[in-house]
Amino acid sequence: MNRTWDRFKTHQLAFASWLILLILILLSFSAPLFSKYVTHYPMGHVNLSDHFAPISWEHPFGTDELGRDVLTRILYGGRVSLLVGITAALAATTLGTFIGAFAGYYGGWLDALLMRFTDTMISLPTLPLMIILAAVDLPKRLNLKALPWEIDVSVLNIIFIVVIFSWMGVARLVRGSVLSLKERDFITAAHALGVSSFRIISVYLIPNCMAPIIVSATLSVGDNIIYESTLSFLGLGIQPPVPSWGNMLNNAQDYLQKAPLLALFPSFFILLTVVSINFLGDGLRDALDPHFVQGRKKNRGSRV
């Protein structure tokens, strides 16, 4: 573990990205405290007499058309966007890991069935189908009005939609790893000792696939944030008054000439978050798989 951390720290872009993401997560998930003690403006505070206020000490990011503090909404919106990205990544990674592990371990007809289903899902046009599912508005059809912990139902709906279309990559990744691992001596020994198949998969195989799983899950967070932002920008994702970076962009498009900063700030934070996640994923891959780094260096040397 110490060696992995040491290798990760040597990747300067990844380490800087990790610090940026840590700060963003802490600020976003402490948004209620930040708005109470720093900005002094609650998320729903409206002041029509102070609309489109410029950047100032009182409003570091200005105000929107309703006089709401943009910095406060950016932090609350970040909490929603990051929640969708991280939760969907965890759920999709868990689903894809078990599908890939069962397909690789059992093989035969089960492997063929699961992988053909996976290939079919990969071949589907992701964004158009996401738009269709979001337009259906499943929570309304299921009569879901409120959820615990004050989570808006539109947040759960977007997480569900994103998970449906984002588990396939990790499933294929885990299947390939399991196919190579299940022929190892320690798996043969586990069979000889009478260990159950489920225990072999969950205790012996999946933990040995964790390095690529962690990297894949990390990178998928950025994709999920892009999906959420796109759907919210189209008016089909997170619904007002709950802010997200995507629906803040949707709201700002009507005021691009009068107040372009309303679009600039959420766009900047989406870009910063996704780029940081990609650099973090690269750093984790290099740290968890040193053979990949050695192979990359050899390839560079051969080209020279």
Image (cartoon, rainbow, N blue to C red):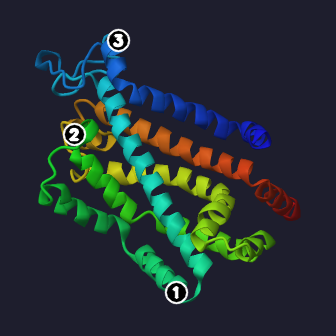
**Vertical comparison of 288 with 56: above or below:** below
Q: What element carries label 2?
A: helix
Pick the quarter of the image with the N terminus. Answer: top right
Please name the residue shown 39% across and 65% down the image: 165
Q: Name the residue under label 1.
A: 112
Residue 251 tag number: 2
Give the Cα separation between the discs numbered 3 and 1. 57 Å
Q: Residues within 10 Å of mark 1 (few under 14, many from 20)?
A: few
Q: Where is residue 272 in the image (x, y as percent from the top left)?
A: 49, 38
Which of pointers 1 and 2 lies earlier in the amino acid sequence? 1
Identify the image quadrant of residue 138: bottom left
Outermost residue toward the front? Answer: 194
Q: Name the residue under label 3.
A: 37
Using the image as rendered, state which of residue 177 and residue 184 is in the foreground.
184
Q: Which of marks 3 and 2 is in front?
A: 3
Q: Which amino acid does label 3 sit on?
A: Tyr
* Residue 183 located left or right of residue 145: right
Q: Position of residue 195 (x, y in %)?
A: 66, 70
Q: Is mark 3 on a helix, strand or loop?
A: helix
Pick the quarter of the image with the C terminus. Answer: bottom right
Q: Position of residue 160 (x, y in %)?
A: 32, 58
Give the Cα separation between the discs numbered 1 and 2. 46 Å
Q: What element carries label 1?
A: helix
Identify the image quadrant of residue 8: top right
Please name the residue shown 60% across and 58% down the image: 213
